[in-house]
Image: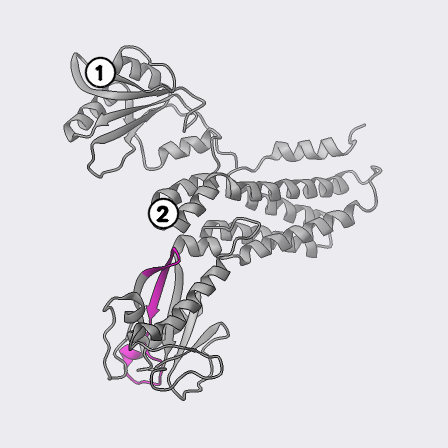
Amino acid sequence: MNISGASTHTIFAIATGSVQGAIAVMRVSGPESGKILKALCGVLPPPRHASVRALTYEGDVLDHALILWLPGPRSYTGEDSFELHLHAGPAIIEAVAQALVHLGGRPAEPGEFTRRAVQAGRMDILQAEAIADLIEAETQAQRHQALRQADGALSQLYTGWAARLRQILAQQEALIDFPDEELPPEVEGALIEDCRVLAQEMQAHLADERGEIVRDGLKIVLAGAPNVGKSSLLNALSGQDAAIVTQKAGTTRDAISVEWMIEGIRVRLIDTAGLRETEDEIEAEGIRRTMQHVEKADVLFHLVGPGDETPLLAPHAVKLRTKTDLTPAQGGELGVHTQDEAGLTPLREWLKAHLATLMAQRGTPPLTRARHRAGLQEAQQHLTHALEASWPEVRGEELRLAMQAIGRLTGHVDVEALLDTIFGQFCIGK
């Protein structure tokens, strides 16, 4: 799936968003860019040098603007482009937009500039997604991660895997199509081992949840029996009066979620309905939803009161002893109470340490989106099927499907590159 195709329209859009400011940047890209810019300011300014020019159309001065002429392919989209740094008055923006339309431009569709950059090979799909993440970044961790991906860290990893898959598949195709060639007998064993190693690397990458946590936030679920202190803890940790706290059991009947920051990571803290046997239809529905949150939690705290030895809700649950101002936690248990800030300190320190361990830097960049996870799961599954295949032809097809799944992540599945590998490595057709 090579994304390609020449653009036939010249597009424009305000690149500085809808927030009122002193300057508005109008971005223009497409084959008519040079002609349009010359019509607006008389002559084309030197490439990549800012200059102030009067913009005129049909004898009317539209604005005195800072101009940047960016001829392709050294531009964001790879096409001839220019930027107009306008005074941000709505009347000026409207007048310039109308002039651009009359001169042959059209308003850009959402994401069209970046789409053209991908089509021109200026970036791949992974880098384009990183640009969107960078624009939406709300935390420093999100900013760092998006910049790393935009610089190509994730693309290099997946491109490297695709190259290794291409090599494995080329060897497999040679074994299938040219059995009479004098190929080393260990070729098949080596390609199977290479396939196994690659599948293991992908599995390890899939197990790394750092990127999705940074992008989407860490989901922390508070679960346990009624009146064990879940709502009080939610309010105390978040500093908000978000949940109703009473002595009556069953007050919380649906999940209550608040967001706050820990060590630069966005955290979503969820208070859930108390777990107990009930005949109340609404409360029972709340308990059912609680169990859904329990299954999907990144961190699950099972809150238990003094003297409560209820078994943990799930294998991944962390026991959190509440009301330790009344009865201290014993035997290294994690304890908490909400009477003062000191009662929250052990839990806050545990969360900081857990996040530090979770987000520790590793050798490979983490995946960041559900699309990446789905694509890699598909590729890893095909590799597993290839290892299980007893027929070389079946193994070859599974390897081909794995390579296509990886290629869809970056937007490149190059059949010609595979043929080059096959015919370049083996003396076929001699």
- Packing grade of label 2 (10 A; few <14, some 14-19, many >=20) is some
Residue at the image position 49 percent from the left and 83 percent from the top: 331
Considering only vertical position in the picture, is 36 above or below 408?
Answer: above
Considering only vertical position in the picture, is 327 above or below 317?
Answer: below
SS at badge 2? loop
Residue 234 position, x and y percent, is 31, 70
- For marks 2 and 1, the one nearer the N-term is 1
Q: Which residue is mark 1?
A: 54
Considering only vertical position in the picture, is 400 above or below 330?
Answer: above
Pointers 2 and 1 in contact (C-beta within 8 Å): no
Q: CA distance from mark 2 to mark 1?
A: 36 Å
Confirm whether the magenta stretch covers residue 281.
Answer: yes
Over which residues does the magenta segment extend?
260-283
Specify whether 235 is left or right of 275: left
Residue at the image position 65 percent from the left and 42 percent from the top: 164
Can residue 255 be seen in the rendering of this structure? no
Which amino acid does the dot numbered 2 rest on? Answer: Ala
